[in-house]
Image: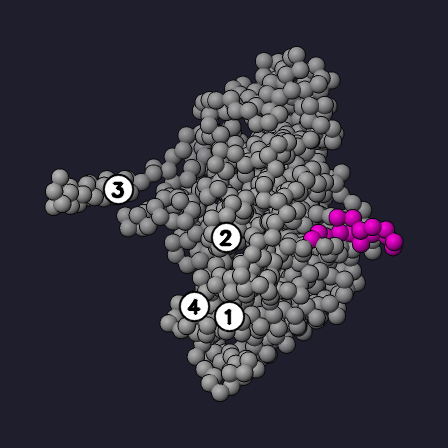
Amino acid sequence: MTRKAFIRGTAHALRLCWFALVCCLACGPRGVFSADFYKISIDQDHLAGIVDFSDLARGPLRDSDRLIACGARLCRAGERGAEPKPVRLFGVTLAFDSVFPSDDQADRLIARFHRLGINLVRLHSFDTVPSSRLTTAESILLDGPFPSFNPESLRRLRRFIAKLAQGGIYVDLNLHVAYTFRPAIDKVPFAFPGDDFMPEDSKPVHLFDERMIGLQKEYARRLLRALAPVSRNAVAIVEISNESSLVYEWSIGRLGDDVKGYYRDELVGKWLAFQSRAGEAANPTRHLPERDGPEPSALKNRFVAFLTELDQSYLDGMRETIKSELPGVLVVGTQMAYGGYQNLISNGNMDLMDSHVYVDHYGFTGKFFDWGTWYIHDVSAFDDGLESFRNVALYRESGKPYIVSEYNQPWPNRQAAEIIPLMATIASLQDWSAIVFYDYSSTRADFDATTPREFVLDTDFTKLPTVGPMAWLYRTFQIAPAAAAVDVALSSGARLTASRDGVTDDSARFIDALRQGATRTGLSLRLGVSLSTDESYSVRANDERPQTVGAQVSFGDGRQRMVLDARSAIGVVGRVAPGVEHAFGSFQLKLSDRARGVVTFIAMARDGEPIERSRRMLWVLPGYTLGSKPGTSPPEPERLAAVSQGIVQRAKDLVKSDGSPRRLRLPSTPRTAGFGALAAYAPVWMERVECTITLRHAFSHVTAYPLDGRGRRLAALPLRDAQLRDGVLTVHLQADGQELTPWYELVFD
């Protein structure tokens, strides 16, 4: 073939490929997924029997229950002279006005939390939208000059924290989350004369403006003093500033957009003073370097060091104020991805390090959180080989307690049953000290809701069946921390490179590239990072070989699923080919030919015995959930459909980092504006996940009971679907003719 002929042929082939791609994109997915569904509802106020995990609850919090940092873990202080005992916190977030329940609501919530095995409640975003209404408890703040406290909100918050303490549940209190300073009212400087411009949530000017910092310290002092009578042992953690740092704003290229006018001049003044202290007074620059600007790397590095110093000064000052009011509390600065590896410096004096992780967070084709334009990609955590979790693991500072104060895979993602088992199991392997689901509720109205909505766990029937079992697994140390560990020691050059490269939630990619072909730092290893004074990159590791023989947890088939094979708990989460029996350690699973090929199956021995000798087991098998299509009679599931979009956007989606070409949403429009806008219509439907489980068991007889939405036994499965012969247990779940349910009680004799 001649060169010209080759070029002509190649060009023709490319045109054909482009034509095929355009046709494919123009057609797009039709949005109808084949699956069987059954109606589902879970009544948290009346959970009983084997699905009630109140046995994990402790009595009232005493001085001996106060939490302390003990090396890389959290511990209870214990009695005087006694050895502190490690503790893990399995938590949920209450956000916005749900932080201020009535007494009756507080009692209901605490009873629910006990049944779900929850021992930490994170109180978040209660500084949002100050209100003029004294009695409605919408925010901790009134709309007067900051900080003007709402007395009714304070009263409710005090009583709620007291009740949580009485119920043995710790509190994580968030200070600055979303309050936006108002120059005319709060007497902070105007960015421009007469112009009320202020960046959203005041980020990042609240981190360096002296007037704002002083007001935040006053807010912290007055709030903690108001809560002092009930907070001694209950308020275990205080977070200073949610998802914010100057380094983060610079590394994502947003610093110049948010810091303007007076505040830019203020920042320039501090930058000049920094240069003077560094001995650069002879040739200082007023210019603020940009991450993508033409400035030399050396100048950018000095600017990042300057921003890091400001971040640290703010956090250290706030920490001192907090400790002066509540000496024993553990303080978090901000989350690691919001500042990256420079946070090892700026947050260096904090008691805990923290991260957030989301799988398939909502996207919006319009304004952020405009629910009329929402979509999801419907991806699994396994689609990128659990990279989201590796990113979080490689932000853990070695030797210091680590928490994940937000995680979710929001409804109506069809793989969302995986998120809580994944998080609890990986956090156990990595020996993290707390995991907190975002959120349990975003408004008090959620407490009485009956259908799924947004991030809310309260009515997410896909996730709720997994909560109790995973709380038990995580809190009782059923999964031993990985024996092998890797500590990545990062020099200042490496950290500054990460900032210049804009490394935020992609730390694993950065570390892999830095290690130049070394063995992939996988989740079967305990991962961590630390500061190095040696400018030559180094890795310290006691053993980089993951456990393989007798492992309690494994990640198989190219990290497309997780297998749990522990003493008293087994399960598989992820992708499994239908119609084929798969051997997973001590058990086998075969999905029905008509299944999607996605499964979350967990079995646990409620009597604490080994699985093969347990007399009483809880099995959990949830599918994804959908609401009903509005206006249909009889009701039918409202399925996800492709978002209408142009060919160019679909082509761009083909190369998104999550690998998904799809943008999906429910066809019905959101119900309202604000909280609860994205909510399902009743009744709620759960995907049927028909499968057969086989395992060895020591007893000779089994009775398998499907359980209703309160955990009560329904008619036992027929003998053909649940039998134990010659030491082999075989159970056919969610088969034709059965009561369909996401959980089962198995009794052996």
Q: Is the C terminus in the top left, top right, bottom left or bottom right quadrant?
A: top right
Residue beneath disc 3: 21
What residue is at 46 percent from the left and 27 percent from the top? Answer: 577
Colour logic? one colour
Number of residues whose C-alpha sits closer than 10 Å to that of mark 2, classed few (under 14), some (14–19) or many (20 or more): some
Number of residues whose C-alpha sits closer than 10 Å to that of mark 3, classed few (under 14), some (14–19) or many (20 or more): some
Q: Please identify the residue farthest to the right as the structure is shown.
A: 81
Q: Nearer the viewer, residue 703 or 530?
A: 530
Instruction: Classify mark 1: helix, strand or loop.
Output: helix
Identified by mark 1, the residue type is Val
Range drawn in magenta: 72-86
Residue beneath disc 2: 515
**Mark sitting earlier along the chain (1/4):** 4
Instruction: Classify mark 3: helix, strand or loop.
Output: helix
When the figure is inspected, residue 144 is found, relative to residue 34, above or below; the finding is below
Task: Find residue 520 and name its label.
Answer: none
Residue beneath disc 4: 291
Identified by mark 3, the residue type is Leu
Residue beneath disc 1: 304
Q: Nearer the viewer, residue 286 or 691?
A: 286
Q: Nearer the viewer, mark 4 or mark 3?
A: 4
What residue is at 59 percent from the left and 65 percent from the top? Answer: 533
**Residue 81 belongs to the span the image colors magenta:** yes
**Mark sitting earlier along the chain (4/2):** 4
Dominant SS of magenta comes to: loop
Q: Nearer the viewer, mark 1 or mark 2?
A: 2
Q: Is the N terminus in the top left, top right, bottom left or bottom right quadrant?
A: top left
Q: Are marks 4 and 2 in contact (CB under 8 Å)?
A: no
When the figure is inspected, residue 570 is found, relative to residue 697, above or below; the finding is below
**Mark sitting earlier along the chain (4/3):** 3
* Count of numbered labels shown in the rendering: 4
Q: Nearer the viewer, mark 2 or mark 3?
A: 2
